[in-house]
Amino acid sequence: MGRAYQNRKESMAKTSNQNARVYSKYSREIYITAKSGGSDPAGNLVLRSLIDRAKKDQVPSHVIQKAIDKAQGGGGEDFSTARYEGFGPNNTMVIVDCLTDNHNRTFGDVRVCFNKSKNKLGGQGSVMHMFDHCAIFVFDGDDEEAILEALMMADIDVTDIESEDGKITVFAPHTEYGKAKTALMDLLGDIEFDVDEIQFVPQETTPISGEDVATLEKLLEMLEDLEDVQAVYHSAEF
């Protein structure tokens, strides 16, 4: 599983220099997270994690605060989630998560990306069953047995745990994100997470090479350029 979050991280890095687009994506996600789960980061762990990630990606404080203020005021854009599934080269599987105020526009834009890159947009549920929806935490450490024991004592259903190069990676069901993070913070104190996210992780990866790599990269680049797209997950292993 460990490569999944790295693939996602590398994919997002391709657009990290496009500041306005990065700010817009974080602003939307912060807005909807604060609106649905509360605008106080102390009581909304998902929002707190999102704000921390935004700061690491150098999103200005005023952009973050503006999104929270919109959520508190109840006005502003009426965004909702949209998720699309499809197939890349060599039957690799792709999930596209969006926040949109116009579902017809977003669906059309995503479909164009698949068509122009010679890939195939699938129906709802066509690939979702081949991904696990996971909370992922990566942090400094090497005693994975102690971490696993603490999480099990907190009655958390740990999906997987890895230890490599002084880093521990914990995978848990996305529904237990809050419990898992609280347990880790109780055990380790003021911990700084390298990764603290909820993602879709493929149950199996599909190796691709040669022209297939270029085909998938074209699709990913086109999707990342869409303002409504928040995240793209895939099962390809380069």
Image (tube, grey):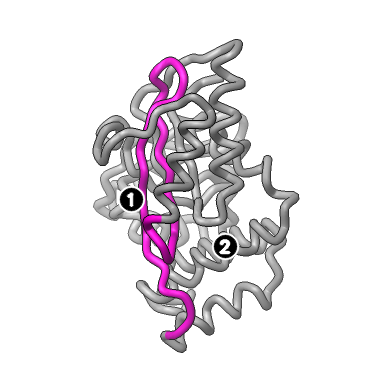
83 or 159, which lies in front?
83
Q: As drawn, which residue projects farthest toward the bottom? A: 73
Q: Residue beneath label 1, please?
A: 174
- Magenta stretch? 75-104
Which residue type carries mark 2?
Tyr
Reply above or below: 9 against 183.
above
Q: Quadrant of residue 24?
A: bottom right
144 or 89, which lies in front?
89
Which label belongs to residue 12? none
Instruction: Please tell me whether mark 1 or mark 2 is closer to you in this view.
Output: 2
87 or 37, which lies in front?
87
Q: Is residue 56 left or right of residue 228?
A: right
Q: Residue beneath label 2, please?
A: 26
Secondary structure beneath label 2: helix
Reply above or below: 86 against 140.
above
Q: Residue at x 39, y 41 (%)?
A: 200
Image location (x, y in percent) of residue 159: 32, 38
Secondary structure beneath label 1: helix
Which residue type carries mark 1?
His
- Asked whether disc 1 touches disc 2, contact meaning CB atoms under 8 Å apart, the reply is no
Q: Residue at x 54, y 38 (%)?
A: 8
- Within-10-Å neighbours for mark 1: few <14, some 14–19, many 20+: some
Q: Count the marks: how many? A: 2
Mark 1 and mark 2: Cα distance apart in space = 20 Å
Q: Is residue 20 left or right of residue 186?
A: right
- Within-10-Å neighbours for mark 2: few <14, some 14–19, many 20+: many
Reply above or below: 237 against 182.
above
Q: Is residue 21 left or right of residue 81?
A: right
Q: Earlier in the sequence, mark 1 or mark 2?
A: 2
